[in-house]
Amino acid sequence: MRKLTRKIYVGDVAIGGDSPISIQSMTTYQTSDIDKVVDQINALENLGCDISRSAINTVEDAKAISQIKKRTNIPFVADIQFDYKLALLAVENGCDALRINPGNIGSKDKVIEVVNKCKEKNIPIRIGVNSGSVHKSMIEKYHGVNVDSLVYSAIEEVKTLEELDFFDIIISVKSSDVNTMIDSYRKLSSLVDYPLHLGVTEAGPLYTALVKSSIGLGSLLKDGIGDTIRVSITGDPLEEIKAGKAILKALGLRRDGIDLISCPTCSRTTVDLPKIAQEVERKIAGINKNLKVAIMGCPVNGPGEAKEADYGIACAKGYGFLFKKGKTIRKVDEDKIVDELIGTIMKDCSDEN
C-alpha cells in the first residue's frame, strides 16, 4: 500500500498524496540556449515526461526561463547550486519549483529572502541531498557518507525551511550505491510525510543505469514509497522517460502506453524474433493505450502467451498467427507480421476514437 504523503503542486502537476507517480528528467543543453532546451523539453513531454528540470548557472540561464515557459507545457524546475540571487531570478522568471539546499546558499538572511519569494509565488522547494552533498558535520557525526548522514542532512535542510514556516517541500536522498539509496529512502520515509523524489544518482550508461534504477526504484515503489521519479542515465534523456514509464508500468503504477512482452528465444525459434520485437517496439512507441502486446517465437508456449495479451503474434517457420483478445484472427507470412499487427492495433485505436 502506498504511503500517503502531503500533496505538493509543481505547476499543475500534483506530487504526493493520491496523485499519480510522476516522471522527471533534466535537460542537457545550456539553459540560455533557448531553442535547444525548448525542443528537448517538448520531446521529453511527447514521450511521457511530467516535469522537466534545468540547471541555472548564470543570469542568462535564469532569464531564459520565461521564454522557455512560453514555448513548453510541462512544469519547469530550476536547479540551483549556491547562488541565492539565481534562485530569486529563477522564481521571478516563472520557474515552477526550485531544487536547492538552503545550507548551500549562505547566510540565514539569504535563505529567508529565497523562502519569502517562493511563498509569494507559491513555488515549492525540493531538498536534494546525495552522496556528494552530505553536510560535513553529518559525515563527522555518523562516520562517513552513509544512510544516517544522508537522511539527517536532508532533515536538517527541511528544518531550516520549517523554521521559516515553509512546508511546500519535496525531498530526495540519492546515492549511486543502490543499497544505500534504498535504505536511505526507507528511513527517510519513516521520519517525514513530505513527498519523496526517487532516483539512483550517477547510475551510469544505459544498461547499468537500467539495472540499478529498476532495482532501486522498483524496490521502493513496491514498498509504497515514492511520489515522483527520475531514472538517471548518462546519455539521451529521452531514454530516462522510456525507462521510467517501463518501471511504473511493470509495477502496475502507470496505465498509459503499451506493455510489450516477448520471449527470450531458444532453439525452437525459427524467425528473427529480436528484429521483429525491436521493429514492433519502435512502431508502438507513440500509441498511448493501456494494452499488452505479445511477440512470441515458437508454437509451444507462444499461442498461450499471445492469447493472454490484448494483441499477439505466435510465430512458426515462415509465418505467424495473429491473436486479438485470445482469439486467432488470421495466419500471416513472416515478412508481413509486423505490418499486420501494427495495422490491426492502429485500426482498433482509430475506431475507438
Image: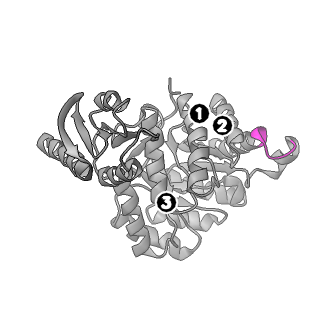
In percent of width and height, residue 283 lies at 30, 54
Mark 3 and mark 1 lie on one chain; the one further toward the N terminus is: 1
**Count of numbered marks:** 3
- Amino acid marked by disc 1: Ser
Q: Is residue 112 left or right of residue 36?
A: right
Could you tell me how far apart the alpha carbons at marks 1 and 2 are, in whole angstroms?
A: 7 Å
55 lies above or below 253: below
CA neighbours of label 1 inside 10 A, class few (<14), some (14 to 19), many (20+): few
Secondary-structure class at tag 3 = loop
Q: Are marks 1 and 2 in contact (CB under 8 Å)?
A: yes
- Amino acid marked by disc 3: Pro
- Return the residue nearer the eye: 155 or 336: 336
Could you tell me how far apart the alpha carbons at marks 2 and 3 are, in whole angstroms?
A: 23 Å
Give the magenta range.
Answer: 143-149
Q: Is residue 294 visible?
A: yes
Q: Residue at the location (65% across, 43% down)?
A: 158
- Return the residue nearer the eye: 189 or 105: 189
Q: Is residue 228 left or right of residue 136?
A: left
Q: Which residue position is annotated with label 2?
A: 182
In the rendered image, which quarter contains the C terminus?
Answer: top left
Q: Are marks 3 and 1 in contact (CB under 8 Å)?
A: no
Mark 1 and mark 2 lie on one chain; the one further toward the N terminus is: 2
Instruction: Indicate which disc residue 219 carries.
Output: 1
Q: Which residue position is annotated with label 3?
A: 237
In percent of width and height, residue 207 lies at 57, 52
The residue most toward the top is 1
Q: Residue at the location (67% across, 64% down)?
A: 82
Which image quarter: residue 155? Answer: top right
Q: Residue at the location (55% across, 63% down)?
A: 88
Q: Residue at the location (65% across, 37% down)?
A: 185
